Amino acid sequence: MHEFCKYYDGTEVVFTDIIKNENGEETIQIHFERPTENGFDSVRFELPTYKILYKDGNYSDEEIELFKTIVERSAASFYRWAREGGIKIA
């Protein structure tokens, strides 16, 4: 997993290396996770489908739509960073 960013509410965004699915297509999973008193709020997207693979906790519909927009707008960068082994910060 590679760190993408962390938001003011504690939501951390991480992404996987490139994974080949059962059809041989390159996929990446992007995880949004926020600690709570009882565990975590979590939502996981898959590229290139933008499909939600997993959702648990109390993220609002508005937050999930924002996350989807982030995934859509950053798809090319996620693929590049996954190929490079994460985000390189000088």
Image: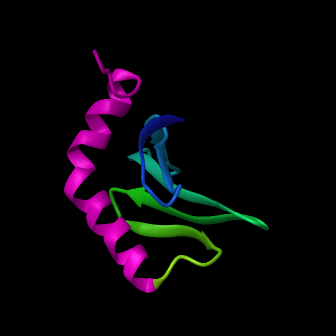
Q: Position of residue 32 (x, y in %)?
A: 50, 58
Q: Position of residue 37 (x, y in %)?
A: 76, 66
Query: For this view, does 60 lie left or right of residue 57?
Result: left
Query: For this view, does 66 lie left or right of residue 29?
Result: left
Can you tell which quarter of the image residue 8 is in?
bottom left
Residue projecting furthest to the top: 90
Look at the picture and state if 30 lies above or below 50: above
Residue projecting furthest to the front: 8
Q: Magenta stretch?
A: 61-90
Toward the viewer: 11 or 85?
Answer: 11
Query: For this view, does 85 lie left or right of residue 16?
Result: left
Residue projecting furthest to the right: 38
Can you tell which quarter of the image residue 88 is in?
top left
Residue 65 lies within the magenta run: yes
Can you tell which quarter of the image residue 86 is in?
top left
Look at the picture and state if 1 lies above or below 57: above
Q: Position of residue 70 (x, y in %)?
A: 29, 60
Toward the viewer: 65 or 9?
Answer: 9
Q: Residue at x 43, y 37 (%)?
A: 18
Toward the viewer: 59 or 17?
Answer: 59
Q: Is residue 23 visible?
A: no
